[in-house]
Image (cartoon, helix red, strand yellow):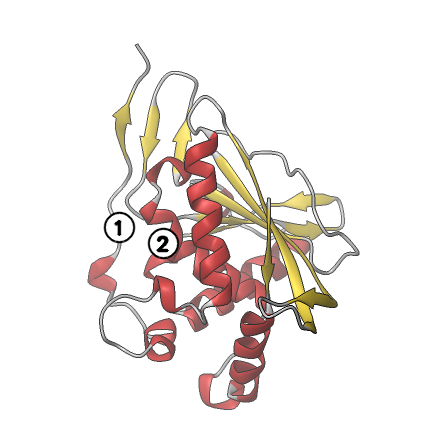
């Protein structure tokens, strides 16, 4: 678990909400977190993987399972190729899947094939949790609510900031604490840097965050990469 300053994340969300007429969608904090994981997970193949007890499959692209509260319990629809989608595409897909999860109208393919799960409990008065892994995935990433509180700055001044906890549950057969620490460090920095850390090249981060991806870049299926002796 690590605590992050969500000030820039919330400021970015407010800016994008102000632009919703231009964008054609209303971006949520959860959309931004999904986009962030879509960029971070390919850098950590063991966290974007499935393990059946014998063989570990790493996946080139991210099929992000998104935990959704439904009337009869938790549903976990899958945003396929999340790393290849623009922010608005992710937003529309999550909204559509969540709505149909609540009406029990998801297709079987829309609930399978996930490579990692995100659970955002920010709508509840929950700061931290220990979410259960969604087998055969190796990691589930959780985000707590944002809480406004006093923070001691580097110059010893005190200022109000919106703080949020990020927490991971992981399969110890596949990942060790060092790898998980590296993932949390990237998420910590990404949440504070206007997503600058996870934007490649010289394209302005906001344009890259919103850009669409050609259909030709759709992924191939995962392949086995490692099996224990």
Tell me the residue that label 2 is attached to. 81
Provide residue 207's location: percent of width, then percent of height.
34, 79
* Residue at the farthest top position: 229
For marks 1 and 2 on the same chain, the one whose residue lies earlier in the sequence: 2
Quadrant for the N terminus in the image = top right
Residue at image x 68%, y 55%?
102
Residue at 54% across, 41% down: 140
- Residue 53: x, y in percent? 43, 18
- Residue 149 placement: quadrant: bottom right
Q: Which mark is residue 219?
A: 1
Question: What kind of element bears circle 1?
Answer: loop
Q: Residues within 10 Å of mark 1 (few under 14, many from 20)?
A: some
Q: Tag 2's secondary structure? A: loop
In the displayed structure, 207 sits above or below 90; it is below
Q: Is residue 26 visible?
A: no
The number of numbered badges drawn on the structure is 2
């Amino acid at each position: 678990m690590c605590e992050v300053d969500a000030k820039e994340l919330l400021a970015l969300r407010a800016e994008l909400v102000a632009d919703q007429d231009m964008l054609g969608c209303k971006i949520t904090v959860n959309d931004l977190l999904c986009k962030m994981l879509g960029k971070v997970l390919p850098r950590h193949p063991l966290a974007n993987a499935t393990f059946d007890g014998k063989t570990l499959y790493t996946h080139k692209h991210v099929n992000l399972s998104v935990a959704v509260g439904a009337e009869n319990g938790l549903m976990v629809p899958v945003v396929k190729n999340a790393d290849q989608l623009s922010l608005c595409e992710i937003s529309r897909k999550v909204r559509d899947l969540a709505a149909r999860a609540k009406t029990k109208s998801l297709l079987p393919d829309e609930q399978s094939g996930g490579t990692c799960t995100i659970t955002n409990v920010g709508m509840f008065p929950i700061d931290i949790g220990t979410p259960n892994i969604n087998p055969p995935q190796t990691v589930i990433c959780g985000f707590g609510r944002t809480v406004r509180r006093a923070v001691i700055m580097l110059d010893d001044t005190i200022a109000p900031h919106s703080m949020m906890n990020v927490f991971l549950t992981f399969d110890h057969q596949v990942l060790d604490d060092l790898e998980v620490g590296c993932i949390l460090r990237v998420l910590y920095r990404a949440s504070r840097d206007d997503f600058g850390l996870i934007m490649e090249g010289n394209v302005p981060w906001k344009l890259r965050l919103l850009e669409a991806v050609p259909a030709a870049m759709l992924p191939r299926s995962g392949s086995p990469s490692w099996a224990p002796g």
